[in-house]
Amino acid sequence: MLFFKEYKNCYKQLTTKQKLIVSKDLIFLNLVFLVLIIIFSVRIHTADTNQLNYIKNNSVSTNATNSYAKTNNNFITRAYITDIKEFSLKDTSVAISFILSTMYSAKDFPTTDPDIELANGKIISRNVYYKTIESGMVHEVIAYEATVDPLFNQKLYPLDQQIILINPIAKNWSNKSYNVTINQVNIESNAVNPNHAYRLVKYGYSNSIDSMSMKIGHTDEIITNKVNSIYLIFNHKNIYSYIKNIQYILLGILIAVLTLFVNGKNSSTINGRISVIGSSVFSLAANVFQINASLKATNSFNLIDFITLFAGLIIMISFITIIKATRLMDTDNYETSRTYELTICYTLLLYIAIFFISIYVCV
């Protein structure tokens, strides 16, 4: 191990009292990190559970199929996703191109064609590819350019998953809403840019019924509503993206910690080490500003906030360690000071490795 021989030689020369000084701060440091890891683990696990539940609730039918079948399914459609533009978590809308192959009764739309709208977005343009009427049933294929308004979850950024929903609804000339039943979803092989940071991992459709109790007059009525969604689930978790987001945070804290390896026997060296730690603070702050520029402002902690908080704590501990080691050199001797800072340095390197690896593995 780096400088381990020097550490071993210095440690052998310590008295029992001097070893106790080093041991007390080492135990305290381990307790601090233990509490910090427990708090982080609970918060991250809660965010991960909420993310999974949100995705599950929006991609799985919440009611039995036979319950849905009892409702009026008068607008059957198959969807083909042809293009999904790249997006970031700061976007308020996502551009999507898709084709709907629909079948409906001509008598439901006697004067005008059905007007497809999105419950969570806006249709930009439509282009009719095909239309025919057989036995009173209309079969048509229409291509749409649209924007949808996603509800991005930032809690686990940069290891987050996102779900984008397309909620089509059909109306006739009297503005009466018709139930849209989705029975198939396909996606073109080149619909998603393979170099996009978010990777499409799952897609499909959900036809379900939402029910709620409402007081009408003096009685409680059950109001039901069909919810029809095409869902696209994207995963941001990959080692390249993770390293890309934390590389400068990691670089900043490693520079701060590795300054403890520098032998600080004279004042010029000590001043130089403090200056290096100061530059690590500015490096961390610049990286935080860069990350925040790609995210929406929020009043809650995200995973990247926990990472920067941890990095700030490491830099602060490195600074305090230099101060304490300098004091020990004045009050005790060089061996005590050197043993102290190398002990803290090895401990910090261990927790840095545990922290960043465990986050990627556990989220």
Image (cartoon, rainbow, N blue to C red):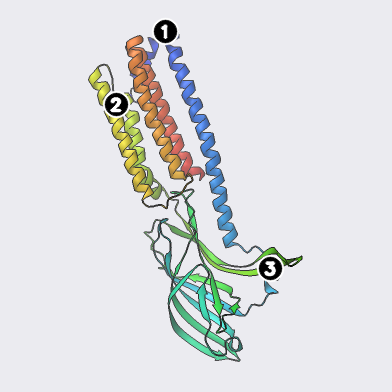
Give above or below for 340 relative to 123: above
Kindly identify the residue that appears in the image at 46 percent across and 21 percent down: 26
- Contact? badges 1 and 3 (CB < 8 Å): no
In the rendered view of the protein, which quadrant contains the N terminus? top left
Comparing labels 1 and 3, the label whose residue is closer to the camera? 3
**N-term-proximal mark, 1 vs 3:** 1
Quadrant position of residue 93: bottom left
Q: Position of residue 286 (x, y in %)?
A: 32, 42
- Which badge, 2 or 3, is on the more N-terminal residue? 3
- Judge the density around disc 1: few (<14), some (14-19), many (≥20) Cα neighbours within 10 Å: few
Say left or right for 354 vs 107.
left
Separation (CA) of disc 1 from disc 3: 78 Å
Per the image, the residue denoted by label 3 is: 223
Quarter of the view holding residue 206:
bottom right
Residue 15 is labelled as 1
Q: Residue furthest left?
A: 268
Disc 2 to disc 3: CB gap under 8 Å? no
Q: Residue 254 location, x and y as percent? A: 34, 33
Assess disc 2: are there few (<14), some (14-19) or many (≥20) residues with their C-alpha within 10 Å of its C-alpha. some
Q: Amino acid at mark 3?
A: Ile
